[in-house]
Amino acid sequence: MRILITGICGFVGSTLARALHAAGHQVTGFDNFIRPGSETNRAPLEALGIKVLTADLRDATAMTALPAADFVLDAAANPSVLAGIDGKTSSRELVDHNLTGTISILEYCKVHRAGFILLSTSRVYSIPPLATLPVLVRDDALVPDATKPLPAGLSPAGLAETFATQAPISLYGATKLASEAMALEYGETFGFPVFINRCGVLAGAGQFGRADQGIFAYWINAWLRKRPLKYLGFGGLGHQVRDCLHPRDLLPLLEKQFAAPKMNVGDRLANFSGGAASAMSLKQLSDWCAARFGPHPVVQDGTPRPFDIGWIVLDHAKATTLWNWKPATPTRAILEEIAAHAEQNPGWLELSAPR
């Protein structure tokens, strides 16, 4: 199978490129290399025989010059929920990259009759019902209070695909939700397969250490280097919770999607995450780091941040039913993988810092 990967030199793109290549697929990808650190993935991918091109998905002309593929895996995005309001990326840049870029790739798929798989995000889900979610603290982590009414589509197992997606969801979340809608419409209109894989927090060795984009990798690298760390918001106690998924766990799913027969539109969108079994708070992550590396102080700062949510865990029950898919890598195995990489790459935070 000929696979084209957007954002191939990012963490997720490069991880899946290696996995797909090892599985026997012909893998080509492109990247605009604007993200600090991404260039370091180019040579190792090319050494495997993976073709890496320099192109920007916002450039429609460049997209027409790409080689034909059977499936496109869209792993390119500005993945920060603060993008567009943090003073680093303008709102227009965010929309151009995450939405206009998606449309450019969909036009490519229309021409080449290629299937399209969008790696989407848990941040398409509505913020207000999550921000007001009744919660308890258990073992230094927030959990939904099941003794009280919970929003529709939410259970202790996580958010189902039926959970609300209306605004506000952040500018970043809105670009991904709009990309989902456009992808499904293009697929139905022009007759090519489309799948929307809403992923929880993706993490693993080689992820760039940015607090707003790769919190597990950032926290472990910063702890090891004795860098200043803060628990922001939620009383400054670090009880906020996220799930955790290694991107290579998506490989069996992608193989099935490449070969899937015609499906209903509603079955083309599902959550893929580590789920409740993988969920961990920052305080629990700190405890893991302390056991692995030794003690390190964390400042308590209750200052809230825009769009921040105390508990986000995705329920992957639909994916399990549709695809017989479950995450394979336990959270602590992911953390250990990141820690070993951090020890082997002492300059990792500087490599991935904004220039």
Image (tube, grey):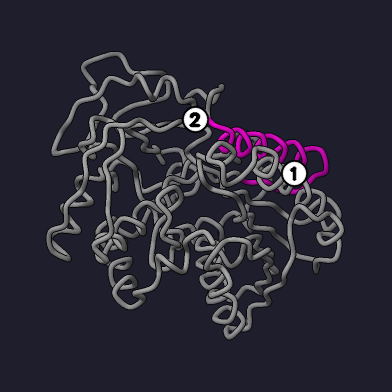
In the displayed structure, does residue 96 sit left or right of residue 144? Answer: right
Look at the magenta stretch and give its main secondary structure: helix
Looking at the picture, how far across and down is residue 307, in whole percent? 45, 31
Residue at (53, 73) in percent of width and height: 18
Q: Which circle, 2 or 1, is nearer the viewer?
A: 1
Disc ID at residue 100? 1
Helix, strand or loop at label 2? It is: loop
| Residue 176 on the magenta span | yes
For the N terminus, the image quarter is: bottom right
Boundaries of the magenta span: 170-195
Residue labelled with disc 2: 125
User: Cα distance, mark 2 to mark 1?
Assistant: 21 Å
| Quarter assignment of residue 92 | top right
| Residue 162 on the magenta span | no
Helix, strand or loop at label 1? It is: helix
Looking at the picture, how far across and down is residue 94, in whole percent? 65, 43
In the displayed structure, does residue 122 sit left or right of residue 337? Answer: right
Residue farthest to the bottom?
47
- Up-down: is 8 above or below 269? below
Task: Tell which of 22 and 337 is nearer to you.
Answer: 337
Could you tell which of marks 2 and 1 lies nearer the N-terminus?
A: 1
Residue at (42, 24) in percent of width and height: 153
